């Protein structure tokens, strides 16, 4: 399987603003499914669970059962892989273009 194919579920998961909000909440530490549902009163429990399922399928979320509770933990490694593959390479290129532009502008007479 190519890296693009394995990245597709991550991009799909990150495409929805509610899933990004869930990941933001998990940055501070694991949350139970019940707590996450309470944090999104505009959505019913089934909708939150569907978002959690998409995040889990993209390996962005690791769920652990403890008794009757399901704890959701952030797994940021897929995001790091996306950063390494897509963002860092383009960021370096953009910085070199901006540096060249600055040099060109600094060299122009006023």
Image (cartoon, rainbow, N blue to C red):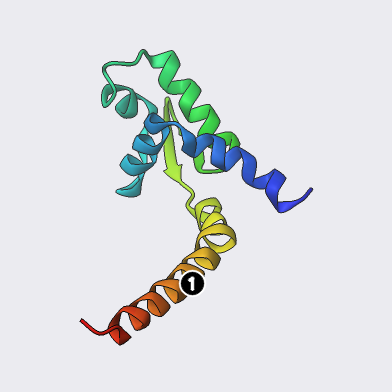
**For this view, does 64 lie left or right of residue 107?**
right
Instruction: Compare residues 53 and 3 and report the one nearer the observer.
Output: 3
48 in relation to 79, above or below: above
Image-based side of 7 in relation to 102, left or right: right
Locate residue 71: give its quadrant. top left
Residue at left 30%, top 28%?
Answer: 35
Which residue extends farthest front? 109
Question: Residue at 50% of width from left, 60% of height from top?
Answer: 87
Q: Relative to residue 110, is residue 104 drawn left or right?
A: right
Q: Which residue occupies 52% across, 64% down?
A: 90
The residue nearer to you, when weighing 51 against 96, is 96
Q: Position of residue 39 (x, y in %)?
A: 26, 27
Front residue of 70/74: it is 74
Task: Please indicate, yes or no, whether residue 19 appears anywhere in the rendered image.
Answer: yes
Vertical relation: 64 (above or below) 48: below
Q: Local crowd at mark 1 within 10 Å, few (<14), some, or many (≥20)?
A: few
Residue 64 appears in the picture as rendered: no
Q: Specify the quadrant of the image occupied by residue 33.
A: top left
Counting from the top left corner in percent of width and height, residue 16 is at 44, 31
**65 sits left or right of 41 in the view:** right
Dividing the image into 4 quarters, which one contains the C terminus? bottom left
Residue corresponding to mark 1: 92
- Identify the residue at horizontal 50%, vertical 21% (top origin): 50
């Amino acid at each position: 399987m190519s890296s693009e194919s394995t990245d597709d579920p991550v991009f799909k998961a990150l495409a929805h603003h509610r899933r990004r909000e869930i990941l933001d909440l998990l940055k501070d530490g694991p949350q139970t499914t019940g707590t996450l549902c309470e944090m999104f009163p505009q959505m019913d429990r089934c909708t939150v669970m569907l978002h959690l399922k998409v995040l889990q399928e993209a390996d962005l979320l690791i769920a652990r059962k403890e008794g009757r509770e399901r704890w959701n933990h952030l797994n940021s490694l897929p995001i790091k892989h996306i950063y390494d593959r897509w963002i860092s390479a383009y960021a370096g290129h953009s910085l070199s273009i901006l540096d060249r532009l600055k040099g060109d502008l600094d060299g122009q007479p006023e």
